[in-house]
Amino acid sequence: MAHNRVMQWAVLARTWWIFDANQQCPFRSAYRITTYLQGLHKPVYHRHGDVGDHVVVFNTKHIAMRGDFWRTYKHFHHTRYAGGFSRASAYRVHEEDPTRILERACHNRLSGLDNRRTLMKRLHLFPDKDIPENILENVSGQIQQVQVVPKKLEDYTQEDIDSFPQLFKMPEDYDIDSYKRENRLEPDQHTSKAWRLK
Amino acid sequence: MAAKTCTKNVMNFIMRSPKFYTSIKLKELLLCRQLYFGCLVRPCLGGSSLHSLPGNRFSSAVVSSPFPSLVSCRTKSTRKADIQISMNLGVCGIEKLEDFTSLSDKSLEDEVTGQINESLEQGNTGRLYAVVYIRGIQHKVTAGDLIVVKYDFPPNVGDRLRLEKVLAVGGKDFSMIGQPLLSRNFVRVDATVVEKTLSHNRVWFVYQKRRSFKKFHLYREIFTVLAINSIQVARLPEQNEEIENQSTQKLE
Amino acid sequence: MANNAIPRDFLKNVLQNGMGRYVCQLQRITFRFCKSHPGSRHMRDFIENHLLDFTQKNPGVVVYLQPRRHRPPSIVAEFLNGRRESMEMMRKEPQEICKWAEYMRGRSGVQIVNMIHNNHTETPSTQGIWHPFMFRDSETAVAKFPDPKYSAVRETGKTATDYVLEEFNNKE
Amino acid sequence: MPQNAMRVWKRVLQRRLAWHFRGRKRNCYRLSLGPVKKSLRFSTTIRPIRRKNIYHLFINRIAAGCAQHGIQYSSFMRVLSESNIMLNKNMLAQLSVYEPRTFQSLCEFAKKRHSELLQQGIGTVLKPTPSGIITRDMIKKSV
Amino acid sequence: MAASMASKLFRAGARSTIRKVSLFSNGLLQKGPRRNYDRHRMRYLKEMYQKRLDAGPEKPRRRSEWINWNYDAEIYAFGQRLGEEFEESTLRQAFINRSYVEGEKKKRAELGIDIDAVPLQLDDNTEFANEGSVLMSSYLKVYLRNIYPYMFEEGISAAHDYLTTDEMLAHISKHIGCEDLILSEEFPTSSATLSTTFKAVVGALFSDKGRERAEQFVRDFVLPQLIETDINELWQIVNPMGLLKAVLVLSGKGEPEPRLLWKSGANTIMSLYWVGIYSDKDFIAKSPGETILIAEEMAAREAIKKIMKTEDSRAPLVLGAAAENLKLDYERVNVSAEDIIRKYYGSEDPQKNTSTSL
């Protein structure tokens, strides 16, 4: 019987996965992460079979939101007391806790499951690259990212920029900095407070 | 009738985009892909649009859309599985076209049959399993198994049967899958009827409140227990051998 | 009945019956009836007409007749696994008594209970049961995670800049 | 038969159906009438639902097995039905768990065949409509 | 509702659709007598039931004490049921135990009948039992050696011992109907008498029908009991790695070298390790485990299974009709693990060797 015991241990083992959330949309990566948390990626899946895996997510600080979701995507909360309703847009929540957005996305996508709480315990979120050593040792596989990580301007080397084909030549005396506006750096000054809190 | 509606459905689907289907070559298809998706399918999570979602596995270098006919007759549960699991695990559509030449080349086929025959001769095929079809239900059986055939099943207790409808046979080295059945010259599944009894008392109770509507039945279903004795596979015909002058099969 | 109100058990086969050879599990059957009471008239009719065919067909089953005064007719079947089951034959025609005798012959004597599975196998898998590491390429075993090679989207497809660069290079 | 006997016997039967309930429903006859009806109704109405749930579980398991080999569930099922392989979902789910090598070979076959069908492109769909079928298009043309 | 249900049960007998046979009296209503329910009877029945409980469980009685019992018919049916034509006399003798014969002699002595004047023709089944057990154990070993040619002798004898324990043979004889037919003093019959009776039946068949038929009988009734168990579990290997090293080195291959293949959840309670065993760079076997040591030991067992060709995907036992044209080589002797270890580890005592290289 020892062989059966050991084989069962292997079949129903809880493996550890790691997911790089750098430049990834939190919502679509949440779909993928929750699939692994529930164990839907295993042929031995069953709702009450508790065959889900652990997922370690890092770089949650560098998630990318589409359009101006940072400003318009709201996290709603109600303390269930009168006047306890409050909302905060994504960038405020992100400043306060960089892992909150992805965690909440996964939590919502596990709605309706009675073992949601245990599944959420198996989600380990880290704002940036450094992950505690003992957790990193457990990892045995990597989940593929949801989106292509775009190449930033800094990533291009100088010759790439020079050798990139130009559609037209800029006149020598053209002053590039002129188009800059003064208040471009401050976040959403131009929107009224009321609209922001809508 | 179903076939009719299905084909009509297909026709409508195509008729709505006449421009697309005039003379088409692979290259052109590529360029007007946007047109294809734009006009045909609402940007919801419909079947074919599933493939057009950014970041999925479909690359524009490949003909991305499966047949519209497939799209129109995909059931809800299939679509749900596609979205819930296949797309979430990132296997939407096909990454790159696999080289399907191996499907039709004969030499590969002979090589496989040669290997199977060789392992049969040496007798190290090991334990075989089979998928058999009895009274409308498919069972996966190996030697030494018990299966239950529900409702009335003519054979009597103690009879030795040969299960004829075998859909697939497999072992640790090979698996043979019939389209839809495997020929009886090469596969033999033996079983004996071990028991013919009635099930326990099952309840059928229907009740509607305040409608004086109440029906109650207790019934017992007849079922038969089959014990699977053995699964045997015979030599497959090599390319050179003709099937007609097949020597007397040991399975006959 | 509701599932959790009644006992449930797996499908059983007495002494691997049928694997070696099939042995009829009905060991003994006793027909109890009253000689005079009208209630047993069907049983008496069965005994006169049909019992002999039953005994000829099943030499391995010992048949006893037990006349009892003023008692309802009934069948008692004793099986090889030692269990004994009785069944009342009140108001049953001879044909139906034949049917129930035949039913007792076909049974394996195991108590009839709700079946959990409708099949039973000692070796469910011939190729080895699936496990999480079965289809992973062995490179990932030695890889040091997190590794951008495994996390990047494999099939990205051509973006607009790729088209532009391609056209540009073709022109040169 | 005096009334009392039937009364006693009814309670014995009821007890058989309500022994596993919680609280007074288990002991008091009058209180257990409703729950017993409910439990018997449940055990009848659940049968089709259970079959549906199990059916979906099979689909999930097959999709998970296919995903491991890199093919989408719908393409896999389409190719199997196209090439006349009549293994039903129960069997495919069992193969994906208990006979992973067979399932792997099915997936590889499905990928190749699916690519072949794609490569054939839309040609097969443009075959002339089988006789005996009238489409709206034909009517429009004839008018 | 229960009333309607109850009444429905009474009328249920008549209606029976083709597929579904509606309830007959057997199911729900095992106990309720149908005809009369008057109040005093109910109280009377309760009273009797209580008395029965106070009196305690019934004394176990032999089946022959009931009225519907006929020994000749039972003996005849026993032979017919198993599909064997026994001689009436040899079969009767097979069921007579020595304790029964002594009991008869004692009774005659008490009654003052002179024993040698009126000879007691009863002779017991001991020599049948001996013949039967010899035939059975030899056939089992020969069968297992031919079916598993690469298995070590110890494994074969372990499987044979499992099949010929008293409990197993008692279980088999009980389920082919010997228990009621046994004539012996002690009741309820112990597993020893049951197993000797089974051996005696095999011996009787051997003397009636010859060796071939008796062997077929053993193959059809004793060997199928191996289906439930895993044959490798029957033989407890104390030091699998040591045995594996001996086997590999003697067969010319390199030493077994365990390698860690996969690792998951190393720092958690549910840690999983897959360890594979290689001998000069080619893979032999692998196995999972909770810790590296367990995985390595299980991998060694898997490797031995592979060498003995009794891994889980081995061919099933050839039983029943398929075994008719089975040709068994009776002189075949399998390799014994004992000699391998003695040869490899020299004179040192093999079991003590605990060197498990990691």
Image (tube, coloured by chain):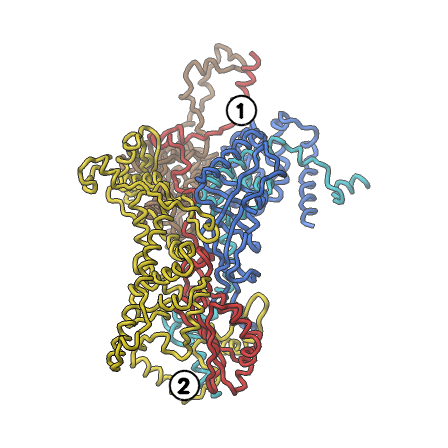
Chain in yellow (letter) = E
Q: Residue at x 45, y 43 (%)?
A: D99
x and y percent of residue B105 in the render? 58, 29
Image side of residue A128 versus residue A34, left or right:
left
Given the image, on which type of amino acid does mark 2 rest?
A: Met
Chain at tag 1: C
Quadrant location of residue C48? bottom right
Q: Foreground residue, E300 or A10?
A: E300
> Which chain letter matches label 2?
E
Which shade is chain D? Answer: cyan
Provide the letter of the chain coloured brown. A
Q: Quadrant of the C terminus of chain D?
A: top right
The answer to whether residue E357 shows anywhere in this view is yes
* CA distance for labels 2 and 1: 92 Å
Say which residue label 1 marks: C160
Q: In the image, which disc is placed on residue E133?
A: none
Decide: is E334 above or below B161.
Answer: above
